Image (cartoon, grey):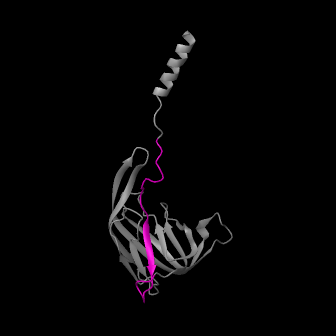
Amino acid sequence: MKKISTLLLLLLLTTASCEKDDICPESTPTTPKLILRFYDISNQDDTKNVTSIGVTSLDENGETFVLAGFNGVTTDSISLPLRIQTTAENFTRFTFYKDFALDDNGTPNDPSDDIFSGNPDVITFAYKREDIYVSRACGFKTIFSELIVTVESDGENWIINPLILNRTIENEISAHVKILH
């Protein structure tokens, strides 16, 4: 009888000290990506695919890398992550290539000698950031506001005009920027 009561006491103590698992549900909104839709410059109500688009950016070491999923795909919309890592920079710069091709010089594990070809256009997205607490399990998410989009002119731009549809990026329900090409 003494063993049973000791066992019950031990069981009660171990279950009483258990905590709820801190797992962030997949349905919880996190930091949204920037959604871009591409439209026909001659009929601005019609979406238009970009042929073999490639998107590159710079990592924290200043090295250029191709964003995963954008290595020669043909599409009329993309979603991109905006930079949130540093407190000094409130902008993200991407290079968009139309008719993108990548030559890895026979060294696929060494991106330092990669050559990108196609028609590149550089776009900078500037914004203000606000970190919002979601929960202990999920941490924080970032909301972007006061979005500004600039395209660097290179004389051969295929991106004609970016139009901001929503200056605040707080979800991924609809496009934030309409790009005419």
Look at the picture and state if 38 lies above or below 138: below
Report the side of 109 relative to 11 (left or right): right
Look at the picture and state if 118 lies above or below 69: below
Place of residue 53 in the rendered image (x, y in percent of width and height, measured from the top left):
54, 76
Q: Residue pushed farthest top?
A: 2
Place of residue 173 in the rendered image (x, y in percent of width and height, measured from the top left):
41, 66
Who's the residue at 36% across and 65% down the image?
Answer: 169
Is 26 in the magenta?
A: yes
Q: Residue pushed farthest left?
A: 146
Of the 4 image quadrants, the one containing the N terminus is top right
Question: Of helix, strand and loop, which mostly describes the magenta segment?
Answer: loop
Q: Residue pushed farthest right?
A: 106
Q: How many marks on residues?
A: 0
Who's the residue at 47% across and 49% down the image?
Answer: 25
Q: Residue pushed farthest front?
A: 1
Look at the picture and state if 15 lies above or below 69: above
Place of residue 134 in the rendered image (x, y in percent of width and height, measured from the top left):
38, 50
Q: Nearer the viewer, residue 13 or 155?
A: 13
Who's the residue at 52% across and 65% down the image?
Answer: 63
Q: Nearer the viewer, residue 59 or 11?
A: 11
Of the 4 image quadrants, the one containing the C terminus is bottom left
**Residue interval drawn in magenta:** 22-46
Is 134 in the magenta?
A: no
Place of residue 43 in the rendered image (x, y in percent of width and height, measured from the top left):
42, 88
